[in-house]
Image: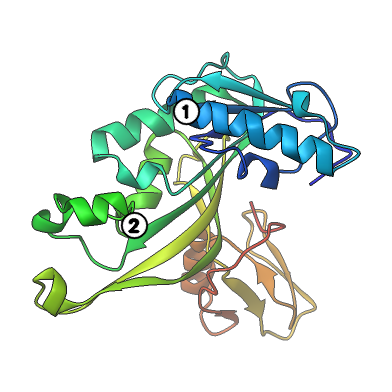
Amino acid sequence: RRTCQQSHRTYVGVGGGLEALQLPIHPQKAAIIAVDPVATMREAAARNLQIAARENDWFDASFVEIREGDAFALPVPDASVDVVAQNCLFNIFEPADLTKALAETHRVLKPGGRLLMSDPIATRPIPQHLKQDERLRALCLSGALTYAEYVQHLVDVGFGQVEVRAKRPYRLLDKSNYQLDSDLLLESLDSVSFKVPVPPDGACIFTGKTAIYTGSEELFDDGAGHILQRGVPAAVCDKTAGNLGGLMPEKVLITDSTWHYNGGGCC
């Protein structure tokens, strides 16, 4: 996709290169840095970029620069890119390796930069025997964390704002085929994490909640930077939702998480 906004983006684990082409591209040399540790994948990506150039008049293969590297050592300077993206890669890591990979994305992002991720998560912890199951590893499912664990990893490495763009059912591990006491549902989580400082009272996590003032005044000011117009839903992070709901529960209605959020909230 072509964009008029100039920015620098890095795709981690680009494989055959097609996923890098899904990122908005500013027509400039090395607008996207595509990283992969496997030589055959980098070669396939180069071929696919040439095909894309032949089939799209505006596109040039030089817009995407393919580099050797991996999630633990991105070949990119500190604070040099606006966006880092990955799809169904980080969930195969053990927790310690996941922390290293996330810290590496945080290192290369500019202040305010965004980490775009799409990964499966588990509705309850995956048992140890499934974490070691080669079938699930081949499907990129063996390392799926719970939602709470996934978000906490992002916050722990310094992402002060996390937005859930989508959460939906992905796959069911049934009890008979996977030796479970009960079926285990996996979900797909799309998120955007921002390289902004973690506030002293905790990170801002947006899951689609809103706050609605139901009192008699036209406006409600909580004294903490949040002004609500009577009867008008205002997007708020989960932290603010909890604070407002506890402050005046009889005058502020907090709606449930929709697990779909596109920015413009309280923080």
| Secondary structure at numbered mark 1 | helix
Note whether 90 is above or below 178 in the view shown.
above
Q: Amino acid at mark 1?
A: Thr
Please say whether residue 74 is visible from this viewpoint: yes
Q: Amino acid at mark 2?
A: Ala
Mark linked to residue 40: 1
| Secondary structure at numbered mark 2 | helix
Please say whether residue 25 is visible from this viewpoint: no
Note whether 255 is above or below 226 in the view shown.
below
Q: Which residue is mark 2?
A: 148
Image side of residue 145 versus residue 252, left or right: left
Judging from the image, the colouring scheme is: rainbow
Q: Name the foreground residue: 103 vs 245.
A: 103
Tell me which label, 2 or 1, sits earlier in the chain. 1
Q: Quadrant of residue 174?
A: bottom left
Measuring from the top left, give residue 255's x and y in whole percent.
55, 79
Residue shown at 53% from the left, 27% from the top: 42
Q: Residues under labels 2 and 1: Cα distance?
A: 36 Å
Mark linked to residue 171: none
Measuring from the top left, give residue 146's x and y in whole percent.
30, 59
Q: Name the foreground residue: 245 vs 138.
A: 138
**Crowding at mark 1 (Cα within 10 Å: few <14, some 14-19, many 20+):** few
Measuring from the top left, give residue 131's x and y in whole percent.
17, 52
**Crowding at mark 2 (Cα within 10 Å: few <14, some 14-19, many 20+):** few
